[in-house]
């Protein structure tokens, strides 16, 4: 299928051929009829992409701060790869469309194939021929409403949420600053609510249009026309509400709002304009400044948007989806008229030229629609859905397939997110004797990006086709945590060698399911991405430490830090706790240094489980204490480790320096490495070697299971307040 994309690094716009998305549970697959270009938000994004790197940095200081923090934590090279990987990728455009349901996912019963729906979301209602849209981001189109008009649903919801934030009442007077697409819709919604509207915009054509659509008066904010109209309509008191629907860097809109508002009026920010509030003016009138967050309650809440959990109507009357349905109803009943807003309708095949014309100013428009071809869609298979036992194997075993010494190792990737594209694929793409065969993702564009950047032969959304491909030697599972166990199980049953990024499983039942697949298939060719034991600096330090004869004490401080709001790591209900997701790294490192698997786990936590103290006990009496904290200083190193035994001490400082102290001498790493090498390259080399030769996997399956069981046992130890023996945990 085709999709409009942009490279944020170069500014390139393209109509790209990408794999069609699968139809996942909890949503519908929609074939687009019309999609709407937001001439404000989207053109701002297009313009930013054309800036220099310095200009991009100035426009997004929040992202610059994240880069600086990443440098402190991960080093310059790793951060550079991550940032460049993001910048030099195709990103989607679009967030408002209307189309026909082509396929219904499991759990959906309010629409059926062939129904017309309006769709929202900058990850789901894209300028693409097909989109997968979750339950709360689509609404059925009322009978008789034209698809080209229903395509306005998302921007209509944005305007509606802004009006709701203003709490307008019959007979009040409102000022709308900025008469672009959102401003024109705000004017109509207010007029339909019995509010007298004054519009302000420097463009006479937009003022004339707003007048036709219900504004009582309009004018250039720099002239006296707007101020005179407000004085006349309000008896000199000022407007009850001001809606800021303008963009750009001028502070004129907020200054105008202060000047023309009545005492204790309301100012609602809908657009993205400068908000340098003149303190005296806002203080003296005690103005109520409010922000309108996109389409309405539910926005940016993954449980609402992605998992389909609705808010009770008695507590949240208007959600994203209810706003969308309400706006469609108003248009269907003629209370809002979007037809006069349509300046241009372009065929989807002309998308790139249309954007160019808008950016260069050749096409002056309030709203532009893409019209899609009406060809019937080909049937699509559904995307895969995404359950501490002892290791048991059948009498038969699955050995690596016979292969010529010169033939390449063919790898398939399931998932191509940030970690895969910054920490794994760069190493594999450079490795001789490796062929990147197929990349599988649930979103079409991420597969296309990985194919372009790393040279995959194929990109698809069909997992079953990959598992059934006899030419694929090994499968990498690098998806969200909740899918790891099930995808690993499927790949093992298909006879593939598997590399799964940590964690292997989120629950004991999931771990049992993986081991049941090993037992059923006889295939134990599995590696979990516990890379730290392969780090060159730690390998050298362990060698310098030498053979241990007595019990050891190990202390491992992990200064994990706080996650950004909205991070999927925080979705404990579906993705497991943060420690379950990451803790296996540190358990595995401790066990490798102590040359054994733990036999018991004890854990305590601060209120809210923010900081964890975990004690692992080993068969010879050795102990490892893991301090996993999120409340430390961001400038302190993430990982520090001390191993004490036999009169010796091994110290690791965040993979940039290591030292070993003995009774009579000490060793200190001679120089700081160029980057924090946490072992990914060496780990991948060992994995590829095992696939190529058919030799043993880099880490025994029993060790992978023991590490996973110990990580899962932390929650049981916290709940029970007592040590958990791993024999019982299994």
Image: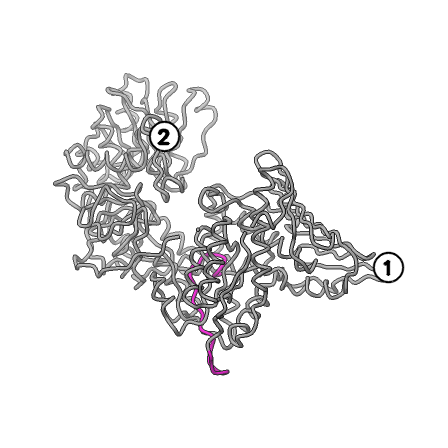
Nearest to the observer: residue 708 or residue 150: 708
Give how far apart the Cα atoms at labels 2 and 1 are.
70 Å
155 above or below 280?
A: below
> How would you rate the neighbour count of disc 2 (Cα within 10 Å): few for under 14, some for 14-19, many for 20 or more?
many
Nearest to the observer: residue 545 or residue 257: 545
Q: Which residue is mark 1?
A: 663
Residue 320's spot in the image, x, y percent?
31, 37
Residue at 28% across, 28% down = 226
Residue 89's spot in the image, x, y percent?
41, 60
Location of residue 680 by image quarter: bottom right
Magenta region includes residue 409: yes
- Left or right of 344? Residue 539 is right
Nearest to the observer: residue 386 or residue 291: 386
Residue at 35% across, 20% down = 262
The magenta region covers: 402-421
Residue 658's spot in the image, x, y percent?
72, 59
Q: Secondary structure at mark 2?
A: strand
- Left or right of 330? Residue 62 is right
Location of residue 706 by image quarter: bottom right
- Left or right of 427? Residue 336 is left
Indicate which disc residue 58 carries.
none
Name the outermost residue toward the right. 664
Q: Which residue is mark 2?
A: 268
Q: Nearer the viewer, mark 2 or mark 1?
A: 1
Magenta region includes residue 715: no
Sequence-earlier tag: 2 or 1? 2
């Amino acid at each position: 299928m085709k999709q409009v994309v942009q490279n944020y690094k170069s500014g390139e716009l393209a109509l790209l051929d990408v794999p069609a998305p699968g139809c996942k549970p909890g949503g519908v697959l929609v074939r687009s009829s019309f999609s709407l270009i937001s001439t404000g938000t989207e053109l701002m994004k297009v313009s930013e992409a054309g800036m220099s790197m310095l200009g991009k940095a100035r426009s997004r200081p929040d992202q610059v701060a994240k880069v600086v923090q990443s440098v402190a934590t991960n080093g310059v090279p790793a951060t550079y790869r991550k940032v460049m990987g993001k910048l030099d990728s195709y990103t989607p455009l679009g967030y408002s469309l209307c189309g026909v349901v082509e396929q219904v996912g499991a759990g959906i019963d309010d629409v059926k194939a062939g129904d017309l729906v309006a769709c929202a979301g900058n990850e789901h209602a894209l300028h693409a021929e097909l989109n997968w849209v979750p339950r709360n981001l689509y609404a059925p189109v009322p009978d008789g409403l034209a698809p080209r008009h229903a395509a306005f649903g998302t921007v209509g919801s944005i305007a509606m949420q802004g009006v709701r934030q203003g709490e307008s009442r019959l007979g009040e007077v409102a000022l709308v600053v900025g008469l672009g697409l959102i401003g024109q819709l705000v004017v109509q919604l207010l007029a339909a609510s019995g509010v007298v509207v004054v519009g302000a915009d420097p463009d006479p054509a937009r003022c004339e249009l707003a007048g036709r659509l219900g504004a009582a008066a309009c004018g250039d904010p720099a002239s006296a026309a707007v101020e005179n109209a407000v004085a006349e309509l309000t008896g000199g008191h000022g407007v009850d509400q001001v809606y800021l629907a303008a963009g750009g860097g001028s502070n004129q809109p907020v200054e105008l709002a202060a000047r023309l508002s009545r005492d204790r009026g309301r100012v609602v920010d809908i657009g993205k304009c400068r908000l340098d509030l003149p303190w005296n003016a806002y203080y003296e009138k005690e103005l109520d400044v409010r922000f309108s967050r996109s389409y309405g309650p539910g926005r940016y809440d993954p449980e609402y948007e992605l998992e389909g959990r609705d808010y009770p109507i008695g507590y949240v009357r208007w959600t994203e989806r209810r706003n969308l349905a309400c706006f469609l109803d108003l248009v269907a009943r003629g209370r809002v008229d979007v037809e006069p807003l349509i300046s241009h309708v372009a065929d989807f095949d002309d998308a790139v030229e249309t954007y160019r014309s808008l950016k260069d100013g050749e096409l002056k428009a309030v709203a532009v629609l893409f019209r899609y071809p009406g060809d019937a869609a080909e049937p699509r298979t559904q995307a895969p859905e995404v359950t501490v036992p002892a290791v048991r194997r059948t009498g038969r075993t699955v050995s690596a397939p016979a292969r010529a010494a010169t033939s390449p190792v063919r790898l398939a990737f399931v998932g191509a997110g940030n970690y895969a594209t910054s920490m794994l694929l760069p190493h594999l793409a450079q490795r001789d004797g490796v062929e990147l065969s197929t990349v599988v993702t649930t979103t079409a564009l991420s597969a296309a990006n990985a194919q372009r950047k790393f040279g995959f032969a194929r990109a698809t959304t069909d997992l079953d086709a990959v598992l059934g491909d006899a030419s694929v030697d090994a499968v990498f599972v690098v998806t969200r945590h909740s899918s790891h166990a099930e995808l690993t199980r499927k790949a093992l049953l298909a006879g593939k060698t598997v590399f799964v990024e940590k964690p292997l499983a989120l629950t004991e039942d999931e771990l049992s399911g993986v081991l049941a697949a090993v037992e059923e298939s006889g295939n134990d060719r599995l590696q979990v991405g516990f890379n730290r034991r392969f780090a060159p600096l730690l390998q050298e330090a362990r060698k310098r430490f030498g053979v241990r004869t007595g019990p050891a004490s190990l202390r491992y401080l992990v200064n994990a830090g706080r996650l950004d709001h909205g991070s999927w790591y925080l979705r404990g209900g579906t993705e497991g706790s943060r420690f379950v997701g990451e803790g296996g790294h540190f358990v595995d490192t401790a066990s490798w240094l102590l040359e054994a698997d733990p036999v018991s786990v004890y854990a305590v936590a601060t209120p809210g489980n923010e900081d964890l103290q975990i004690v692992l006990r080993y068969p010879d009496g050795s102990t490892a204490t893991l301090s996993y904290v999120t409340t430390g200083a961001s400038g302190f190193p993430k990982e520090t480790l001390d191993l004490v035994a036999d009169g010796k001490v091994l110290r690791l400082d965040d993979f940039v320096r290591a030292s070993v102290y003995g009774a009579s001498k000490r060793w200190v790493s001679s120089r700081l490495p160029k980057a924090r090498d946490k072992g990914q390259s060496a780990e991948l080399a060992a994995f590829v070697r095992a696939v190529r030769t058919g030799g043993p996997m880099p880490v025994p399956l029993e060790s992978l299971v023991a590490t996973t069981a110990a990580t899962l046992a932390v929650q049981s130890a916290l709940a029970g307040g007592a040590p958990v023996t791993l024999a019982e945990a299994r």
